[in-house]
Structure formats: C-alpha cells, structure tokens
Image (tube, rainbow, N blue to C red):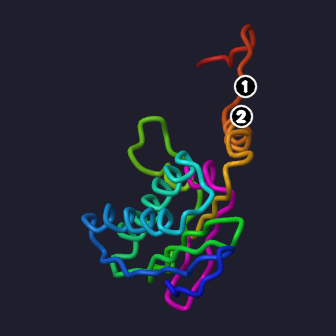
C-alpha cells in the first residue's frame, strides 16, 4: 500500500490465495487486517459482515476454481469493495437452498448483507465482488431484504397443506 494514498481512498490491496480450504481463514484475516489498518469508518458489525462475506467468496473460489486466485480490497471514500478473481468461467447465481441444505446460502448472504454485489467476466475467468458502506441504513436495508425474502403469513390465512 503506497504511503501517498489519500485519506479519501485506500488501496487497492491485493494478494494471491492458494486453492485449499486451509487458506480460507488466513485470507479472510488478511482482508480484515488491511481494513482495520486503513481505519475506515465502519462499525464492528459491518466488519463482521465483511469477514463473513469475504469468507463466502473465498470459499466459493477454493471450491469451484481449483486453482490459485486473487483477492483485492479497495476503499473509494464511501464504500469498501472486496473482489475475488478466479479462473473458473462458470458464473455463480443465487440459488434456492432447501431448509436442510448445507450449501447454497453463500450468495444469499452476500445479497442480504452487502450494499451491492456482482459478477463480471475477467480475462482470467471471472470476478465476484461485494461492497459495503458506512453503517448508516444497514439495519433498515437488511430488514427490508429479509421482509422481501420471507413470505408474510397471517393468522387465519395459513396456506393449505396436502
């Protein structure tokens, strides 16, 4: 990280991750360490979200790419962005995980807890990213997303069962 970086922006800070499950905790800690070093205006709850979401994207790359990949962290003065670029050309999509499923909820968490997220084709394969902003409005945003995702059931109007 250059010493001349302005206080309004930070990064990019990037590093390579080997494709093993053992590499996930270290990569997640590196993301959080650099964000803390930058002293960004993010709450502890938001930092917890960054840690969780970073872990989700990194784990997906380990699981699906089966090759070394890159993690990049940057701050634009308003939002923190974490990107994971891997060689797998398969584009991830939000899926439907059953209540008993042990997989398939990662991108739902990314959707629910980030300010924005996306997937882009890259010369290497693809880049999956998320952004979080300062804590203003985070609780309201999450509550709205949960309300949108969970059907409303009123007493006396329960769906018929077969």
Q: Where residue 34 appears, x then y in whole percent?
A: 46, 69
Asked if marks 1 and 2 touch (Cβ < 8 Å), the reply is yes
The mark closer to the camera, 1 or 2, is 2
> Residue at (71%, 34%) from the top-left corner?
147
- As for residue 31 lying within the magenta part, the answer is no
Q: Secondary structure at mark 2?
A: helix
Q: Is residue 66 above or below residue 151?
A: below
Provide residue 110's location: percent of width, then percent of height: 57, 55
- What residue would you read off at disc 1? 152
SS at mark 1 in the image: loop
Return the mark for residue 160.
none
Image quadrant where residue 82 sits = bottom right
Residue 32 on image: x %, y %: 45, 62
Rendered view: 71 above or below 105: below
Q: Give whichever of discs 1 and 2 has the lower sequence position.
A: 2
Identify which residue is drawn at 61% across, 66% down.
80
- Looking at this view, name the residue that lies furthest to the top: 156
**Any magenta on residue 115?**
yes
Q: Which of 50/33 is in front?
A: 33
Q: Which residues are magenta?
A: 108-128
Q: Residue at 42% x, 36% y: name it.
A: 100
Q: How many marks?
A: 2
The front one of 113 and 135 is 135
Measured as percent of width and height from the top left, residue 89 is found at 50, 80
- Residue 45 shown left or right of residue 28 in the figure: right
> Which one is nearer the viewer's eye here, 86 or 75?
75
The residue identified by callout 2 is 147
Residue at 67%, 17% (x, y): give it. 160
């Amino acid at each position: 990280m250059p010493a001349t970086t302005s206080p309004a922006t930070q990064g990019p800070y990037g590093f390579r991750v080997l494709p093993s499950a053992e590499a996930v905790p270290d990569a997640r800690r590196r993301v959080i360490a650099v964000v803390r070093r930058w002293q960004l205006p993010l709450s502890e709850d938001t930092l917890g979200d960054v840690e969780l979401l970073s872990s989700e994207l990194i784990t997906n790359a380990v699981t699906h790419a089966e090759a070394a990949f890159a993690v990049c962290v940057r701050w634009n003065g308003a939002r923190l962005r974490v990107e994971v670029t891997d060689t797998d050309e398969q584009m991830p999509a939000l899926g439907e995980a059953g209540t008993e499923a042990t997989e398939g909820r990662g991108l739902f968490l990314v959707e629910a807890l980030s300010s924005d997220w996306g997937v882009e084709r890259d010369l290497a394969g693809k880049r999956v990213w998320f952004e979080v902003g300062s804590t203003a409005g985070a609780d309201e945003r999450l509550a709205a997303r949960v309300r949108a995702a969970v059907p409303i059931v009123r007493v006396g109007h329960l769906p018929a069962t077969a």
